[in-house]
Image (cartoon, rainbow, N blue to C red):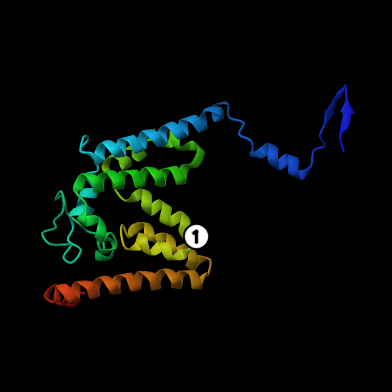
Amino acid sequence: MRHRNGGAYHRPVTSRTATLDLARPRIPAARFARPARDGAFLAGLAFAFLIGIGVLPFAVDAHAYWAANPLDPYSGAALADFDAYFYSPAFTQAIWPLHWLPWPIFAGLWTAAIVVAFRWLSGLWLGLVMLLPPVFIEVAMGNIHAFIAVAIVVGFRWPATWAFVLLTKVTPGVGVLWFAVRREWRNLAIVLAVMAVGSLVAFILIAMKRPNLAARSASAA
């Protein structure tokens, strides 16, 4: 029902209208967020394209992922080496088909995927987020943090994605304690089971192709 007040009609305030009003951005800059988001997204994809055709020599961190031998990823790896690989063999084996791509194409696709990840994570505010130094550096260097962030966000609905975190940077995997604190034992078991299966498959693949290396890894453990 509408009420007349001074010649104008006004909607009654209900829980629904109050929710809709709160959902509307009240920041003056919000009107520019959508074009800024679209512009930042296109600029990020253009940046990835230039890397992909070899014009820009960025995505240097991703080179270690591309160059790692899936069956012997730690060969010659040392701290501060340019192509040192220190993640689980399961990760480099998971992207095995991408190793066959020429480096510039791999770098371009990797960078584009990072841009898409930040687009999904930040939503309407991508234009602002892309101006933050850590985010811009992440896009330029081609590390794995954006994908870890996606895995963490998705992991609260599908816990299996936390295995990706534990099989890469490891340290952010402390977040799985969330399930333990909340006594969500089923979700915690899913994470640990997927991680165990991924590790086992990686070990079997190495053992099939490099039995001596697998034996050394087993004895070291």
Q: Residue 174, how many percent across, how many down?
A: 39, 61
Is 216 left, or right, of 56 in this rendering? left
Looking at the rendering, which quadrant does residue 93 occupy?
Answer: bottom left
| Image point (47%, 42%), residue name | 122
Q: Is residue 195 above or below residue 117?
A: below
| Image point (22%, 35%), residue name | 56
Q: Residue 74, how many percent across, how many down?
A: 16, 62
Q: Which residue is mark 1?
A: 156
| Image point (56%, 28%), residue name | 31
Kindly tell me whether residue 133 is visible in this rendering: no
Is the residue marked by circle 1 packed among few (<14), some (14-19), or many (20+) residues within 10 Å? some
| Image point (42%, 52%), residue name | 150
Q: Is residue 39 above or below residue 179?
A: above
- How many marks overall? 1
Nearest the camera: 118 or 86? 118
Q: Quadrant of the C terminus?
A: bottom left
Q: Residue 128, how many percent across, how many down?
A: 44, 33
Q: Quadrant of the N terminus?
A: top right
Name the outermost residue toward the top.
Answer: 6
Is 93 left, or right, of 13 in this rendering? left
Which residue type does callout 1 highlight? Answer: Phe
